Image (spheres, helix red, strand yellow):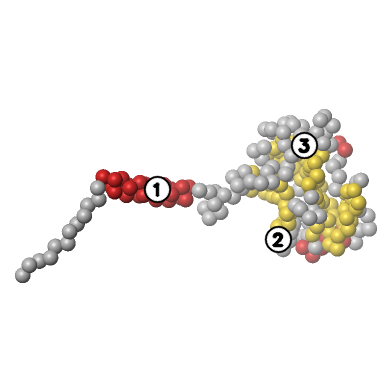
Amino acid sequence: MSRLRRAVVLPGREGLLTVVLVVAALAAGRAVEAWTPDDRDGFGRPFVHEAAVGDTVSLRYAEVRADRVDGAPVLDRGALAPMKSPGLWVVTTLTVTPTLDNLVLANASLVDGRGRELQLGGRNVRLCAAATPGVATACVVAFEVPVDAAAGSRLRVARSAQEIRGDDLLEVDLGITAAEARGWAARTDRVSAQIPPALDPTTGTRPTEAP
C-alpha cells in the first residue's frame, strides 16, 4: 500500500522576514499597552494631597493653603450682577505661592456630600490671580451646591485644566457641617467671590476669571 505524503512548503527569505516583522510588531504593541498609564494600574491618576482648611501644602509647582470657606444663597461678584441660587454658593479663598514658574490655578472642582464632583462651567466661578515664583496671590472659587449636600464637601485644585494625570492635586476637606449649611441657607446678605485686595497683584498681573 502506498502512503500519501503531504508536501511541506517552507517560506522563502521574504516570507520569513515578513513573519519576523509581524511578530516584532505584535510584541511591541503589547509592550506599549503594558506601559501605557491608565486608571486600571493607577499610573494615570494624579498624586492627591489631602488637607484641611488652614493647612499649607507643598505641591510640586506651588504652596497652596485654603484660608476661608463661606456660604450663602446669593453670590456677590463685584461689578457683575449677583447670582442667586436655590441652594447655596460655597466659596473658598486660597493663597497660592508659585515655586517653579508663573502660575494660575486653572483646575478646580468640588465633591459634594453626596459624592458628586461639580466642575467649573455653567454658573460656577474661578477667579484666580497670576503670580511669579515666591509671590503669594489668591484664588477664589465658588460652586453652587444643594443645601443638603453641602456638608462634607471637598475642594480639589490643580494647575492644569487639561491634563492632571501624574501631577499633584490638592484635595481640601472644607469642614462644612449640616448645621453650618442650614445657617448659610438662612442668610440674607451676600457671600463674596472677589480676590482680597491684599492678595491682588498689581505688578503686571491681573485676576483671570473662568466660568
Give residue 174's position: percent from left, percent from top: 76, 53
Residue at left 54%, top 52%?
A: 38
Q: Does the image show residue 182?
A: no
CA distance for labels 3 and 2: 29 Å
| Disc 2: CA contacts within 10 A as few (<14), some (14-19) or many (>=20) | few
In this rendering, the label closer to the viewer, 3 or 2:
3
| Kind of residue indicated by mark 3 | Ala
Image check: 206 left or right of 117?
right
The disc placed on residue 130 is 3
CA distance for labels 3 and 1: 47 Å
| Kind of residue indicated by mark 2 | Arg
The residue that disc 2 covers is 116
CA distance for labels 2 and 1: 42 Å
Q: Determine contact: label 2, label 1, CB under 8 Å.
A: no
Give residue 126's position: percent from left, percent from top: 79, 47
Q: Please report whichever mark, 3 or 1, sits nearer to the chain's N-terminal start.
A: 1
| Mark 1: secondary structure | helix
Kindly give the residue lying farthest to the right in the view shown. Answer: 188
| Mark 2: secondary structure | loop
Q: Does the image show residue 209?
A: yes
Image check: 126 left or right of 159?
right
Residue at left 82%, top 36%?
A: 206
| Mark 3: secondary structure | loop
In this rendering, the label closer to the viewer, 3 or 1:
1
Choose top left, top right, bottom left or bottom right for residue 66: top right
